[in-house]
Image (tube, grey):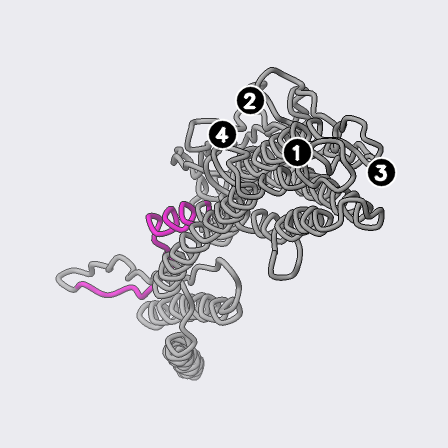
Amino acid sequence: MSSLFGSLSIALRSLLAQQGALGTVTNNIANANTPGYSRQRPVLREEAPIFNGHLVLGDGVTLESIRSIRDRILELRLHQETQHQERLDAFLGAMRQVEALFNETEGIGLESVLSKFFDSLQALSVNPSSLPLRQGVLTAAENLAAAFRQTTGNLSTIRLGLDRAITQGVGEANRLAAEIANLNGQIAALETTGQDAGALVDRRNLAIRDLSGLVDVAIIDSTGGGLTITTTNGTPLVAGITSLPLDAQLDSATGMQHVFSQGTDITSALNGGKIAGLIEARDSAIPSVQADLDNLAANLASAVNTVHRNGFDLSGSAGGDLFVPFVPLAPGSNAGAAASFALALTDPAQVAASSDGTLGSNGTLMALLALRNQAVVAGQRPVEFYSNLVFRIGDRISDASAELEAENLVLKQLENQRSAISGVSLDEEATNLIRYQRAFEAAARVIAMVDELTSTTLNMLGRG
């Protein structure tokens, strides 16, 4: 009797073990396309044998645990490369908006209106007393000033858009940090009781990946299944079951949002993730472009006004300023020159064409035309300076694009490695499904056989 019940016990344990293994395989198949899922493997363990005299009898099998297959070092690499990729992607997206403002091939930018301004002076120099041609000069000058104002205004609009995106990014980072802290608590509770927390660890890894896409992260393992997450410069984001939110605060000096942690401004300390890329474009790249535009506007207006004041208008009066003179907000600074670039004259008769006060003279016009080929700003001709500005924008975009392309390749290789280790192979799972199914069926047959033998034995004893 004891041997039959022993066989029944072994078969029952096997039935339960194979049933658990089948459930694990089924779960793998169900999550074959789930982002971040790590395939699970049932761990079957032989039960401790039973010693019966000089005999050692096996006592079956048990499902010891279900383990998620993952490479923790590879996961860390994925988090690190994600933050580099997202920083480059965010920066590149912002700079492509800037590049669109200087698309000279589609007639967008300053080169065309700058050339038309000098062309209008050339046309007037042929007939200096012509009012229509004088009006043409004023129109070209107004178009030039409007182009400066529009371009720098569009740059400011892009910066404001990036500023809003940074604020939104901080809010999303805080949400993810709170989710990770909550998952830390759940994982610790499960692992303390010896249960598998693989599904929650997968969710936490996905949340960390998303967080690393926003800010640079460093991960420190803690006891009890928790994690401590900081930025690479040590700013705490998650400590066990506690999240430490970031805060976006308006900086009165710049009018832009800065990122704070526990009262400390960490804006310049962020060096990875989408937020860092947006900050780089907002606080460095775009202001650099605006500064170049301001320098060009201030120096061009000053050079034109200087020549124009030395000439004479149609009535023989001394010429005034063609453009509104720029008044610096601070000594040595041209900040705001492009935004304030405006035409000072409205009467075409006041265009100073003559250099000696006579009607037929075009000496002042020729001096204005000569500015086209003179070193007006930073030792460069106006069009040359502008062309170099456009080149620098394109160069930064080209460098960022090359870096992003390389980063995408690295990330793809890491994703492929993760897929090979943690991904679900449907062919492999189909094989496992058949294997565990047959073991389950065999265990069920043993139970049926033991049941039949037990009934037969009981009937025999009853008849005896």
* Mark 4 vs mark 2, CA separation in Å: 20 Å
Looking at the rendered structure, the kind of residue marked 2 is: Asp
Q: Earlier in the sequence, mark 3 or mark 1?
A: 1
Estimate the x, y position of residue 175 in percent, counting from the top left: 62, 39
Q: Earlier in the sequence, mark 2 or mark 3?
A: 2
Q: Earlier in the sequence, mark 4 or mark 2?
A: 4
Secondary element at tag 2: strand
Q: Earlier in the sequence, mark 1 or mark 4?
A: 4
Q: Is residue 464 visible?
A: no
Looking at the rendered structure, the kind of residue marked 3 is: Ala
Question: Badge 1 is on which residue?
Answer: 304
Disc 3: CA contacts within 10 A as few (<14), some (14-19) or many (>=20): some
Q: Are marks 1 and 2 in contact (CB under 8 Å)?
A: no
Estimate the x, y position of residue 81 in percent, counting from the top left: 41, 49
Report the front residue among 356 and 350: 356
Disc number at residue 239?
4
Question: Badge 3 is on which residue?
Answer: 349
Estimate the x, y position of residue 364 in percent, counting from the top left: 67, 36
* Mark 4 vs mark 3, CA separation in Å: 74 Å
Q: Nearer the viewer, mark 1 or mark 2?
A: 1
Looking at the rendered structure, the kind of residue marked 1 is: Val
